[in-house]
Image (cartoon, grey):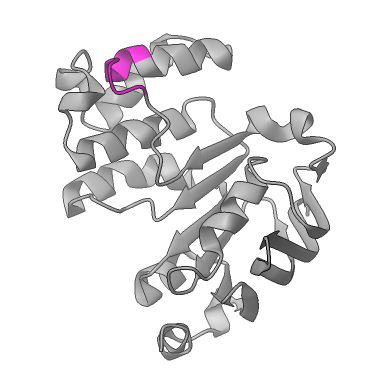
């Protein structure tokens, strides 16, 4: 089975503070890694490194068979990121934002309208992002993240600001199909929900891995202990 992510002794420091320290793991293609931990544990920093937006301080990082940061150019266009920053221009409409990203990735413009309909924004596609609610912005950002059908999807609390119906509408876009599941790294504060979608669970505390195991063998209580 192809390995999508390989980390060995990954560390990232901000001055004297270690945001990540000694993270090592291997994630097969088509699998979902869910990362748990309290605020400040290093979850978002890990995603930013995998997305080629941050350089590691120590250790080695291989993503989609490219060594980061040296070969970031090889993999950047094959990654989709849904983070706390929606990466959308507020003065542009959802359709204009997605068409801009479609040009960047040489994606058929017809996919823009398909995705906007899929996330329930077809009727508001021409309204500026600045007029959207937080949940609508999240849906537009999700459509942007999957627009180019990335090989690796990085999701930082992807269901934040979404009601149950909106979360359900996004699910097939973010997970893929049984025949072609997406390779994903997901951060979560929901022990039960996160474990239900995970193949591998990673628990971080103060940047250090304190739990790494197949999700089937991890309990909700073990995840809950990370937050105590």
Residue 137 at x, y percent in the picture: 27, 35
Q: Give yes or no for residue 198 being in the magenta stretch.
A: no
**Residue at position x 30%, y 40% in the image:** 138
17 lies left or right of 216 = right
* Image quarter of the C terminus: bottom left
Q: Nearer the viewer, residue 112 or 208?
A: 208
**Residue at position x 54%, y 79% in the image:** 216
Vertical placement of residue 117 versus 43, above or below? above
Residue 90 shows up from this direction: yes
Residue 28 at x, y percent in the picture: 71, 57
Residue 57 at x, y percent in the picture: 77, 57
**Residue at position x 61%, y 57% in the image:** 46
Magenta stretch: helix, strand or loop mostly: loop
199 lies left or right of 23 = left
Q: Residue furthest front?
A: 15
Q: Number of marks in the image?
A: 0
Vertical placement of residue 173 versus 95, above or below? below
Residue 31 shows up from this direction: no
Give the magenta part as a residue range: 89-96
19 lies left or right of 83 = right
Q: Quadrant of residue 142?
A: top left
Q: Nearer the viewer, residue 41 or 217?
A: 41
Q: Nearer the viewer, residue 119 or 16?
A: 16
* Image quarter of the N terminus: bottom right
Vertical placement of residue 11 versus 1, above or below? below
Vertical placement of residue 60 versus 70, above or below? below
Residue 92 at x, y percent in the picture: 30, 15
**Residue at position x 41%, y 12% in the image:** 99
41 lies left or right of 99 = right
């Amino acid at each position: 089975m192809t390995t999508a992510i390989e980390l060995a002794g990954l560390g990232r420091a901000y001055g004297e503070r270690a945001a990540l320290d000694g993270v090592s793991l291997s994630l097969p293609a088509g699998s979902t890694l869910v990362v748990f931990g309290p605020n400040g544990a290093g979850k978002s920093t890990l995603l930013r490194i995998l997305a080629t937006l941050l350089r590691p301080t120590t250790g080695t990082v291989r993503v989609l068979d490219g060594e980061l940061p040296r070969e970031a150019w090889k993999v950047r266009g094959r990654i989709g990121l849904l983070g706390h920053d929606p990466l959308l221009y507020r003065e542009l409409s959802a359709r204009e934002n997605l068409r801009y990203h479609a040009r960047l990735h040489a994606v058929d413009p017809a996919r823009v309208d398909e995705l906007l309909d899929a996330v329930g924004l077809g009727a508001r596609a021409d309204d500026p992002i600045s007029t959207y609610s937080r949940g609508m912005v999240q849906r537009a950002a999700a459509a942007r993240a999957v627009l180019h059908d990335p090989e690796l999807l990085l999701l930082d609390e992807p269901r934040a600001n979404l009601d149950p119906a909106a979360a359900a509408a996004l699910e097939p876009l973010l997970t893929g199909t049984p025949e072609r599941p997406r390779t994903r790294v997901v951060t979560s504060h929901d022990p039960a929900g996160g474990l239900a979608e995970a193949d591998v669970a990673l628990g971080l505390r103060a940047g250090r891995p304190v739990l790494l195991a197949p999700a089937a063998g991890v309990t909700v209580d073990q995840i809950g202990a990370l937050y105590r």
